[in-house]
Image (cartoon, rainbow, N blue to C red):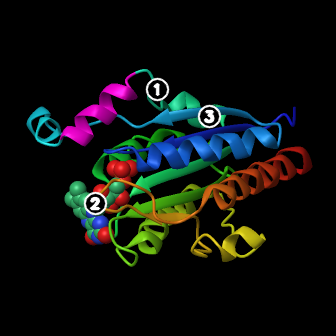
Amino acid sequence: MSNVNVAVIYYSSTGTNYQLAKWAEEGAKSFGAEVKVLKVKELAPKEAIESNPAWKTHLEETANVPEASLADLEWADAIIFSVPTRFGNVPSQMKQYLDTTGGLWFQGKLANKVVSAMASASNPHGGQEQTILSLYATMYHWGAIVAAPGYTDQSAFTSGGNPYGNSVTVGQDGRIQEDVVEAVKHQARRTAMIAAAVKNGL
Ligand SMILES: Cc1cc2nc3c(=O)[nH]c(=O)nc-3n(C[C@H](O)[C@H](O)[C@H](O)COP(=O)(O)O)c2cc1C
């Protein structure tokens, strides 16, 4: 055990970001971290969900995944986010969760959290990088330490090479087009490793 707590917090309508979160869980666990995979609360109207069978199925399949709370943020030394793009921004479900963190921020309890993020879109250039950067803007306000993967591992060169955080393209068939498994695990391990250094060194 590395005495580091990692929260992997995601939003997913149709499963892509849940899959990224699960690979990140494996990566952080391989560092010896204690890991929680947590979803943010679904806020979409029932009619919208019912109109998309893949969305409805995914929600049912992940009904047992716990919802992220503010206590989870206090517990976590490192947080890895995963979100689908919404026109280059984070989904409103994730934004709503982030908007509940004002109290923790005010008390200084989000400072020095080590964070990184992942994203997905339907198109190869559909806004993955911008979505991650949009999320990082909030992290800078938190006083968090952004542990972007950069090109710190060979896996970056076979996974699409997004240095801000791993990202994927999801085809019409719902499948992830890039081979990002090792790169996601590396990102998670690195985020946990930097959190351990911060926690044990500060
Ligand atoms: C409101 C909305 C906006 C979206 N905007 C974009 C976009 O600008 N570019 C793009 O490539 N995909 C866009 N998408 C597609 C999603 O990013 C894609 O369905 C998602 O990455 C799948 O992730 P998930 O399976 O975890 O839900 C959008 C989807 C929705 C519902």
Neighbour tally class for label 3: few under 14, some 14-19, many 20 plus, Cα within 10 Å? few
Mark seen at residue 172: 2
Tag 3 or tag 2, which sits nearer the N-term? 3
> Residue flagged by tag 1: what amino acid is it?
Val
Q: Secondary structure at mark 2?
A: loop
Instruction: Pinpoint residue 10: horizontal percent, then vertical percent.
Output: 46, 44
Please say if 99 is above or below 76: below
Q: Secondary structure at mark 3?
A: helix
> Residue flagged by tag 3: what amino acid is it?
Glu
The residues colored magenta run: 53-63
Left or right of 36, for residue 189: right
Neighbour tally class for label 2: few under 14, some 14-19, many 20 plus, Cα within 10 Å? few
Front label number (2 vs 3): 2
- The reply to whether residue 106 is in sight is no
Question: Which residue appears farthest toward the front when viewing the image?
Answer: 173
- The reply to whether residue 73 is in sight is yes
Q: Real-space Cα distance between discs 2 and 3? A: 38 Å
Instruction: Pinpoint residue 167: horizontal percent, then vertical percent.
Output: 51, 65
Tag 1 or tag 2, which sits nearer the N-term? 1
Mark seen at residue 65: 1
Q: Quadrant of residue 52?
A: top left
> Residue flagged by tag 2: what amino acid is it?
Gln
Q: Quadrant of the N terminus?
A: top right
